[in-house]
Amino acid sequence: MKFADGERVHFIDKKGRHYPLTLCKRKVFQFSGETIPHDDIIGREDGAAVTFSRGSRFVVVRPTLAEHILKMPRGAQVIYPKDVGMILIWGDIYPGAKVVEAGIGSGALTMALLRGVGERGIVISYEIREDFSKVALNNIRSYMGKTDNLILRHSDVYDGIGEEDIDRVILDLPEPWRVAGHAAKALREGGIFLCYLPTTLQVASVVESLKESGVFTHIETIETLLRTWHVEESSVRPDHRMVAHTGFITVARKVRR
């Protein structure tokens, strides 16, 4: 598929560094004293090699969701791709699911949820900060275009969840234990509650609230560490830097008592 006007692309240099750009006809991209017209990129194929005005060569690609998340504008802190992937699996996000999330943040997890539920599913996102939701919606449209299966609610999920018969409740907020009771009412039987938290004290509070609710069972908490490797000729070793702790994922299932 060829690049189109208005599309988000990434330039990748010989060291693997990414530089994002939204294509716009008749504009010129400037980078480190060099330039390239957007029109030289529009109509090219994904993965094409391009040459800037002073001879520097880049590969221009349509970014993966993980690449887009790491380079997109942020209102709130994003959930890292390594944790987004775990949330999709442990939360069992499937095509056709009806998902409530809070809050939308910068839209990283929302995009993954929208992909997971597909066109037959729906994502309802609670977010009280309009500045966050504005950034998030721009990021989502930039990568996914129009999304008819996203509903944004400018209301406080701590005050309640208006929907019923929900398949999944996914939370990225400071006090998810305040939502446990609302989730117990909103989720269908067999539905899954999942929250993402940075500290052990928060995890302890949410696990206690889930147990006290009387309807949640199979409560588990996990942490994901990501270590990349340097592989080049005879040098095969772990990279000097790794993405270690970013947060804890706590999962529970609603059952009939």
Image (cartoon, rainbow, N blue to C red):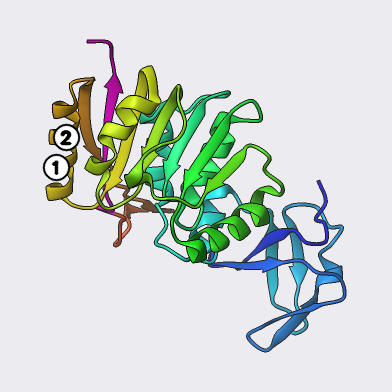
Left or right: residue 40 versus residue 211 is right
Along the line of sight, which residue is nearer the eye, 61 or 133?
133
- Residue type (three-letter) at the residue carrying disc 1: Ser
Q: Position of residue 146 (x, y in %)?
A: 71, 47
Q: Neighbour class for label 2 at 10 Å: few (<14), some, many (≥20)?
A: some
Whether residue 247 is in magenta: the answer is yes
Q: Position of residue 160 (x, y in %)?
A: 36, 40
Q: Position of residue 98 (x, y in %)?
A: 51, 28
* Kind of element beneath mark 2: helix
Q: Residue at x 81, y 45 (%)?
A: 1
Q: Which residues fall within the magenta stretch?
A: 244-257
- Residue type (three-letter) at the residue carrying disc 2: Ser
* Kind of element beneath mark 1: helix
Task: Check the picture and name the quadrant holding the C terminus.
Answer: top left
Q: Neighbour class for label 1 at 10 Å: few (<14), some, many (≥20)?
A: some
Left or right: residue 65 versus residue 243 is right
Residue designated by label 2: 209
Res. 205 mark: 1
- Direction bottom: furthest residue: 33
- Direction top: furthest residue: 257
Pointers 1 and 2 in contact (CB under 8 A)? yes
Along the line of sight, which residue is nearer the eye, 54 or 97?
97
Q: Up-down: is 176 above or below 56? A: above
Q: Residue at x 83, y 57 (%)?
A: 44
Res. 169 mark: none
Whether residue 169 is in magenta: the answer is no
Left or right: residue 211 versus residue 125 is left
Along the line of sight, which residue is nearer the eye, 1 or 229?
1
Left or right: residue 42 versus residue 226 is right
User: Residue 241 falls in which quadrant of the image?
Assistant: bottom left
Q: Position of residue 21 (x, y in %)?
A: 68, 68
For marks 1 and 2, give the CA distance.
Answer: 6 Å
